[in-house]
């Protein structure tokens, strides 16, 4: 039996106490992966708590698949001034 095809993917890099890109536009079904490039831990926490990572050490990653359209603001719970947003659009 063949493996299921992976859906679309996107990445966010954590570096210098910022999420890059700060705003990411993706389609429904996209898996977003955040990777910590800083030398101290960070987290990824959606403001409505629909997703939350554990503390990510250097080079650790966290992924979340967006199953519905909307805007998902998030922040680092260890450094709340670090913010970002994923804008999820309905598939065409």
Image (tube, rainbow, N blue to C red):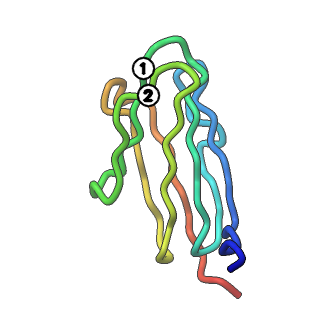
Q: Which residue is mark 2?
A: 56
Q: In the figure, is residue 17 to the left or right of 53?
A: right
The disc placed on residue 70 is: none
- Residue projecting furthest to the left: 49
Q: Is residue 26 above or below residue 2?
A: above
Between 78 and 6, the residue placed more toward the observer is 6
10 Å neighbourhood of mark 2: few (<14), some, or many (≥20)?
many
Instruction: Tell me which residue sits at (71%, 88%) in the image.
Output: 92
Lateral position of residue 54 relative to residue 31, left or right: left
* Residue 9 percent coordinates (x, y): 68, 59
Estimate the x, y position of residue 29 in percent, counting from the top left.
Answer: 58, 73
Residue 13 image point, x, y percent? 63, 34
Query: Who's the residue at 36% across and 51% down the image?
Result: 46
Provide the secondary structure element on which disc 1 rests.
loop
Crowding at label 1, few (<14), some or many (≥20) Cα neighbours within 10 Å? some
Do the residues under discs 2 and 1 have CB atoms within 8 angstroms? yes
Q: Quadrant of residue 79?
A: top left
Q: Residue furthest top?
A: 39
Seen in the picture, residue 64 relative to 56 is either above or below; the reply is below
Residue 78: give x, y in percent of width and height: 32, 25
Q: Residue at x 58, y 54 (%)?
A: 32
Image position of 21 (left or right of 54)? right
Q: Quadrant of the N terminus?
A: bottom right
Distance between the alpha carbons at the discs numbered 2 and 1: 5 Å
- Specify the farthest residue to the front: 1
Residue visible at 48% across and 56% down?
Answer: 64
Residue carrying label 1: 41
The number of numbered badges drawn on the structure is 2
| Furthest residue in direction bottom, as rendered | 92
Secondary structure type for disc 2: loop
Question: Which numbered disc, 2 or 1, marks the residue that appears first in the sequence?
Answer: 1
Q: Nearer the viewer, residue 12 or 75?
A: 12
């Amino acid at each position: 039996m063949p493996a299921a095809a992976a859906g679309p993917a996107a990445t966010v890099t954590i570096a210098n106490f910022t999420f890059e890109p700060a705003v990411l536009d993706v389609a429904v079904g996209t898996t977003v992966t955040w990777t910590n490039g800083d030398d101290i831990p960070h987290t990824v926490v959606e403001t409505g708590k629909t997703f939350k990572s554990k503390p990510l050490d250097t080079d650790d990653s966290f992924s979340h698949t967006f199953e519905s359209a909307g805007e998902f603001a998030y922040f680092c719970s260890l450094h709340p001034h670090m913010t970002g947003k994923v804008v999820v659009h309905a598939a065409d």
